[in-house]
Image (cartoon, helix red, strand yellow):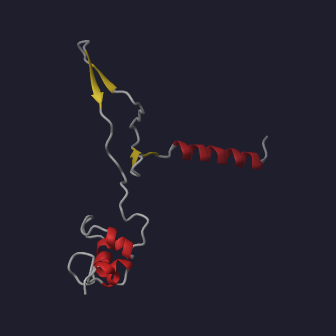
């Protein structure tokens, strides 16, 4: 009979393997976007055309082209990696691009201090930055 430590190691290996088998497949694209493959969906990687075969009950066969998947779960933003509320973030953020979010509220409070719905001359953070030289007095 196996000792307790061997049994625990065996259980640990089985647990790790099952967790690995149940994990999601994520495709990372060169532009930084990602796509998580849903359960039951297949992935084919090829540089050639891919066809799907359909067999009819009368014996006929139909082949149709399978087009590349354009769906994405995550598309990177120009503000990714920037400190929210910083001068650089304020310049990069596009107001209302996401609707009313916490980032939009932060932009209104921290960036657009003169309430003209744009970030630039007249806003406190912009006027205190190295870019303030473009503002005329």
Question: Residue farthest to the bottom?
Answer: 137
Residue 49 appearing in the image: yes
- Could you tell me which residue is drawn at 27 percent across and 25 percent down? 64
- Could you tell me which residue is drawn at 41 percent across and 52 percent down? 32
In front: 87, or 62? 87
Answer with left or right where residue 4 lies relative to residue 54.
right
In the displayed structure, 56 sits above or below 27; it is above
x, y percentage for residue 105?
29, 76
In the displayed structure, 70 sits above or below 136; it is above
Answer with left or right where residue 56 lies relative to residue 130.
left
Question: Residue farthest to the left?
Answer: 116
x, y percentage for residue 33?
39, 51
Residue 110 appearing in the image: no
In the displayed structure, 60 sits above or below 123; it is above
Q: Quadrant of residue 27?
A: top left
Q: Quadrant of residue 132?
A: bottom left
In front: 97, or 15? 97
- Please count the marks in the image: 0
x, y percentage for residue 136?
25, 83
Q: Which quadrant, please, contains the C terminus? A: bottom left
Answer with left or right where residue 103 lies relative to residue 1.
left
- Could you tell me which residue is drawn at 39 percent across and 30 percent down? 47
x, y percentage for residue 78?
36, 62
Q: Which quadrant, please, contains the N terminus? A: top right
């Amino acid at each position: 009979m196996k000792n307790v430590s061997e049994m625990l190691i065996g259980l640990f290996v089985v647990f790790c393997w099952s967790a690995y088998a149940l994990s999601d497949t994520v495709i990372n694209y060169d532009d930084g976007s990602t796509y998580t493959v849903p359960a039951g969906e297949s992935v084919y990687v090829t540089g050639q055309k891919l066809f799907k075969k359909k067999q009819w009950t009368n014996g006929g066969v139909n082949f149709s082209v399978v087009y590349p998947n354009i769906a994405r779960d995550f598309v990177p933003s120009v503000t990714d990696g920037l400190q929210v509320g910083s001068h650089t973030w304020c310049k990069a953020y596009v107001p209302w691009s996401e609707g009313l979010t916490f980032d939009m509220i932060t932009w209104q409070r921290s960036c657009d201090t003169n309430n003209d719905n744009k970030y630039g001359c007249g806003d406190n953070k912009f006027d205190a930055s190295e870019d303030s030289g473009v503002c005329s007095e």
